[in-house]
Image (cartoon, helix red, strand yellow):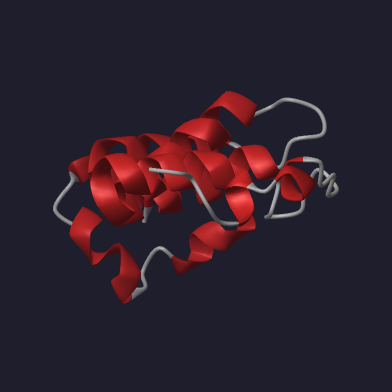
Amino acid sequence: MNKTGFLHDERYQLHKPGPYHPEVPARLARVYQGIEEAGYKGAYRALADLMVEWYGKPGKRSLADEIALIYLYAGDYDLAIEWFEKAYEKRAPDLIYLGAPLYDPLRSYSRFQELL
């Protein structure tokens, strides 16, 4: 089966967006691979794993609260809480929203309760 689509287009592979642009080829390729391996949750997990690799590296956009949220979407609740704890240490401003219904899957975890 031939691979088709923009991820496999030679012109797209040469695309050089800025470091904070969401369409960085490496990022999209990792999401695509995750979808092929495990559907949408696999895509979220693959993206979060990539962002962990990039965390703290110059020129790479990777924030602890974003990593946590993506792990939440992937259903990896322990990793989500671990990264919310790191975001708390960094005083991430978006943590004020942890009371929103989006975070309900984490409410039964005592570590999450400590962040509220």
- Whether residue 63 is visible here, answered yes or no, is no
Residue at 45% x, 44% y is 2
Q: Nearer the viewer, residue 38 or 107?
A: 38
Tag count in the figure? Answer: 0
> Outermost residue toward the bottom?
101
Q: Nearer the viewer, residue 60 or 64?
A: 60
Split into 4 quadrants, where in the image is the N terminus?
A: top left
Is 84 left, or right, of 112 in this rendering?
right
- Whether residue 27 is visible here, answered yes or no, is yes
Residue at 85% x, 44% y is 16
- Above or below: residue 6 compared with residue 77: below
Quarter of the image for residue 116 reads bottom left
Residue 39, percent across and down?
A: 27, 52
> Outermost residue toward the front?
1
Residue at 42% x, 51% y is 70
- Above or below: residue 79 compared with residue 98: above
Residue at 23% x, 54% y is 106
Residue 30, percent across and down?
A: 50, 39
Q: Nearer the viewer, residue 63 or 21?
A: 21
